[in-house]
Image: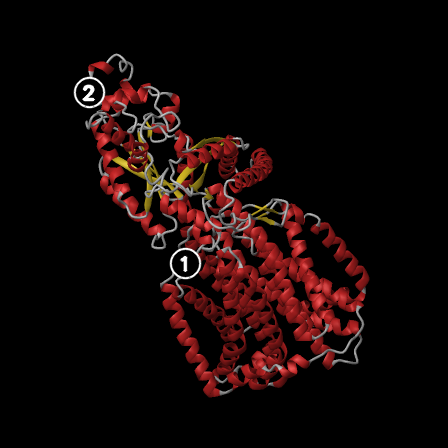
């Protein structure tokens, strides 16, 4: 008896010899850890979807600070009457007033607050004075409407081109503490990179992270309450519209909706904060709804399989305990659930259920063979027999999930760590609780009716044993490989925020409306940094009437020269004609309006300098500060992209945009692109490349592990093939279906390998044992299908049905996860019960293998 066998015997004997004490210790530890489960928070902020070391992230933070870009929400308002009618204007005024009273809303900007420059008969010199708005303008409605529809400040941004929809811009109070925390933590991390043994910096970093988490949690709750209050105000003015966007209270599982009535006026809320808040709501709802549904359907499957409630309750109890223990541990350690890692519970349920089913089936098998043995003896044999294959299955699964730590995205890294830790806990507590509880239960005859009447494993074994059928299996597998590779060539890494939600949801309708009628939803920032040049001679073409006012504007006078204005105009014209770009805001808008006010004459450099120097603080904040930085010699273009356009390929679009802008300003300036779209696209590209790079490492690690476990090079190669083929088929199916890889589906490789490894190890381990007993490959296949085969398809069918309910979600990442998991389980089951035994029979028939059969058998 080798050392590993002695260890297995000791562990198994320890669990069954004192089951009451063992169970009591397990439950005490479970209760302790589960107490921390409520501390496990959900974080779906945009920060969780960013690269840790992305240079564009640093640029974006710098741009946000330099140009004082506020955090805003957008409300699209479509009244049932003309936008300039008395009822629409009064509603808009009352709505703005109510929104402005909400805590955290700094200001509300609407049509009522928009300066009317063109319709009020102003001259250029009037720009420096008080400018009328819709509240106090004497202009005709026709003139005002014409200005809203034609002014570069407002067209397709503040109002739609059909003049039926307008936007209210809610500027939220800034949170300087957030960026201060980020800067402080980044500085401490950089300090530790240069001096790893700096204990003071380590302590400070730990304290800063804890303080930041507490601050961010408070901020998230406040933002949720703020959005909830905004929605309540919207509902008040939207009584005749469709049901409002669903949201879920931070401390409640219920969703609040306004009942559906006939559509009249409509208001929709949009903005990054709203998207993040709704994502939290959907994730929380899906975790509760589909977690419960999965357990119920899996319970039903288990009852059908075993026709005995003891096994159903035992399996579900162990699954719940394992999930609770893992969640408590993560809550204790300060982990957080993100959109990416939200499915760790479902994945842990899969793997835990697999371990428990293997234990139950092993117990039932030994019960039939050793019916005269005591209950503890049968439990001991089941634990001992399943210990090695379950350990190696979990170990290789951990290798699959640990590949996620190669990513630069913290939530992806967290998912890898969380899955590795959770399935380790599942292995420990599954054996611990199964051994203790089953040892305390009395012996009871097992019901094998399902095995007798449902002959799937027998059918699969017959296919594998039949030479002609085996050739068909190989042909189908080769075809699946080719089609899968073809489908993979069609895969793209693409995603959109609007693509997270179904078309019938209000959040989708609102984002689509803002996209199509109000200039787009996803922001993009373009910076034109001018190259340093010698100072140009002073321009003296200023009209005499402005000479005295302009005497102190040397810096501005020099900066606003023809070279910079030429770049400004050419870039602005390019962006406004660029496909997939909606709203474009820049200094060029002022040039266009100024030309109208200046009797058709272009504003020269000195006139712009005068405006820069003399404009009031509020006017400068609206017209100049967001778009020009004289100190940094930069122009800023604020762009919104059409996120809902299905033709938009973001990586290709950004690459083309960068190249064409570089060509446009060649020799004069440097182009930098940042913003939400850029950062998110960088994240997806990095995730895809890291997964591809780590795939080779994972497969190599699997191959070495298989070789060590099975002591056979051929078996190791077969096991690798069994895992690679389903992965290729799943990814190929995605490509052929036109599904792009996004933050959720891009992890399907790790999921596929993690699930597939278990089946291959369990089957091959059992096959080698049966081969050692029968000394015949065909008999070993039949025996393996009649034993471990049932555990494989029990697990597969239970999970398949359980995850099928996710397709009814309103959140596409959840839908894709459920559908892809089902597809993985289907391919894995077919691969394990048909292709794997076919390959084993083929390799056993090789002459070289026949010569080494005795050695292989002895190795078992």
Name which quarter of the figure residue 460 lies in. Answer: bottom right
Name which quarter of the figure residue 739 lies in. Answer: bottom left
Point out which mark residue 539 bears: 2
Against 83, residue 360 (above or below) is below
Q: Circle 1 is placed at which residue position?
A: 740
- Marks 2 and 1, the one that precedes in the sequence: 2
Secondary-structure class at tag 2:
loop
Residue 618 at x, y percent in the picture: 39, 24
Q: How many marks?
A: 2
Residue 694 at x, y percent in the picture: 46, 57
Against 365, residue 596 (above or below) is above
Q: Is residue 404 left or right of residue 558?
A: right
Q: Is residue 496 left or right of residue 245?
A: left
Q: How is the image coloured?
A: secondary structure
Q: Is residue 518 left or right of residue 213?
A: left
- Picture residue at 76% right of the left edge, 53% below the top: 28
Residue 543 at x, y percent in the picture: 20, 17
Pick the residue in front: 724 or 559. Answer: 559
Point out which mark residue 101 bears: none
Separation (CA) of disc 2 from disc 1: 54 Å
Instruction: Specify whether residue 682 is in view.
Output: no
Pick the residue in front: 470 or 509. Answer: 509
Q: Is residue 270 left or right of residue 324?
A: left
């Amino acid at each position: 008896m080798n050392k590993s066998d002695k260890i297995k015997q000791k562990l198994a004997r320890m669990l069954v010899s004192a089951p009451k004490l063992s169970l009591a210790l397990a439950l005490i530890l479970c209760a302790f850890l589960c107490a921390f489960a409520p501390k496990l928070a959900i974080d779906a902020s945009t920060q969780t979807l960013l690269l840790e070391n992305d240079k564009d992230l640093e640029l974006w933070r710098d741009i946000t600070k330099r140009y004082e870009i506020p955090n805003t929400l957008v409300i699209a308002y479509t009244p049932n009457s003309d936008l300039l009618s008395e009822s629409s204007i009064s509603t808009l005024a009352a709505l703005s007033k109510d929104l402005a009273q909400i805590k955290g809303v700094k200001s509300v900007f609407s049509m009522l607050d928009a300066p009317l420059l063109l319709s009020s008969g102003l001259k250029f010199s009037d720009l420096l004075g008080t400018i009328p708005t819709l509240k106090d303008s004497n202009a005709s409605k026709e003139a005002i409407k014409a200005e809203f529809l034609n002014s570069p400040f407002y067209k397709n941004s503040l109002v739609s081109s059909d003049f039926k929809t307008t936007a209210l811009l809610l500027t939220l109070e800034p949170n300087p503490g957030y960026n201060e925390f980020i800067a402080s933590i980044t500085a401490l991390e950089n300090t530790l990179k240069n001096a790893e043994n700096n204990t003071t910096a380590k302590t400070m970093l730990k304290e800063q992270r804890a303080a930041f988490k507490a601050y961010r949690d408070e901020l998230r709750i406040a933002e949720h309450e703020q959005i909830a209050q905004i929605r309540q105000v919207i509902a008040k003015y939207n009584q005749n519209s469709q049901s409002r966007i669903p949201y879920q209270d931070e401390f409640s599982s219920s969703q609040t909706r306004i009942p559906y009535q006939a559509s009249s006026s409509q208001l929709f809320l949009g903005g990054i904060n709203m998207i993040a808040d709704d994502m939290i709501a959907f994730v929380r709802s899906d975790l509760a709804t589909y977690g419960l549904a999965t357990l119920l359907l899996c319970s039903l499957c288990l009852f059908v399989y075993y026709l005995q409630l003891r096994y159903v309750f035992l399996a579900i109890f162990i699954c719940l305990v394992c999930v609770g223990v893992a969640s408590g541990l993560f809550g204790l350690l300060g982990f957080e659930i993100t959109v990416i890692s939200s499915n760790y519970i479902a994945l842990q349920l899969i793997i835990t259920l697999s371990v428990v089913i293997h234990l139950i089936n092993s117990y039932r098998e030994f019960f039939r063979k050793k019916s005269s043995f005591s209950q503890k003896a049968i439990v001991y044999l089941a634990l001992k027999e399943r210990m090695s294959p379950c350990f190696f299955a979990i170990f290789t699964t951990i290798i699959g999930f640990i590949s996620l730590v190669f990513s630069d995205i913290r939530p992806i890294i967290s998912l890898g760590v969380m899955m590795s830790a959770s399935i380790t806990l599942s292995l420990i507590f599954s054996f611990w609780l199964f051994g203790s509880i089953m040892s305390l239960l009395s012996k009871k005859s097992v019901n094998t009716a399902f095995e007798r009447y449902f002959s799937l494993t027998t059918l699969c074994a017959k296919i594998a044993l039949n030479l002609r059928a085996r050739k068909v299996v190989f042909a189908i597998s080769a075809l699946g490989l080719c089609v899968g590779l073809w489908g993979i060539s069609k895969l793209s890494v693409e995603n959109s925020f609007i693509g997270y939600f179904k078309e019938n949801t209000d959040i989708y309708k609102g984002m689509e409306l803002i996209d199509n009628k109000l200039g787009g939803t996803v922001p993009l920032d373009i910076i034109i940094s001018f190259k340093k040049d010698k100072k140009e001679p002073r321009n003296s073409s200023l009209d005499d009437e402005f000479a005295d006012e302009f005497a102190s504007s040397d810096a501005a006078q020099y900066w606003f020269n023809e070279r910079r204005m030429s770049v400004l105009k050419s870039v602005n014209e390019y962006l406004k004609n660029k496909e997939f770009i909606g709203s474009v805001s820049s200094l060029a808008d002022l040039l266009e309006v100024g030309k109208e006010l200046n009797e058709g004459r272009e504003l020269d450099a000195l006139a712009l300098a005068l405006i820069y120097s003399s404009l009031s603080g509020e006017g400068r904040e609206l017209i100049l500060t967001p778009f020009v930085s004289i100190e940094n010699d930069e122009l800023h273009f604020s762009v919104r992209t059409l996120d809902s356009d299905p033709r938009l390929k973001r990586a290709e679009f950004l690459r083309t945009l960068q190249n064409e802008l570089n060509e446009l300003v060649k020799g004069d300036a440097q182009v930098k692109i940042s913003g939400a779209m850029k950062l998110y696209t960088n994240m997806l590209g990095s995730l895809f490349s890291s997964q591809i790079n780590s795939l080779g490492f994972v497969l190599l690690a699997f191959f070495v592990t298989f070789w060590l476990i099975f002591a056979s090079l051929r078996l190791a190669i077969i096991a690798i093939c069994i895992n690679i083929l389903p992965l290729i088929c799943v990814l190929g199916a995605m490509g052929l279906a036109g599904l792009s890889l996004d933050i959720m589906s891009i992890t399907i490789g790790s999921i596929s390998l993690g699930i597939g490894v278990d089946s291959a190890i369990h089957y091959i381990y059992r096959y080698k044992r049966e081969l050692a007993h029968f000394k015949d490959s065909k008999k070993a296949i039949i025996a393996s299908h009649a034993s471990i085969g049932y555990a494989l398809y029990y697990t597969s069918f239970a999970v398949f049905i359980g995850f099928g309910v996710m397709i009814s979600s309103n959140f596409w990442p959840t839908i894709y996860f459920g559908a892809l998991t089902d597809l993985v389980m289907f391919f894995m089951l077919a691969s394990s019960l048909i292709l794997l035994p076919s390959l084993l029979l083929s390799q056993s028939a090789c002459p070289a293998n026949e010569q080494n059969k005795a050695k292989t058998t002895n190795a078992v």
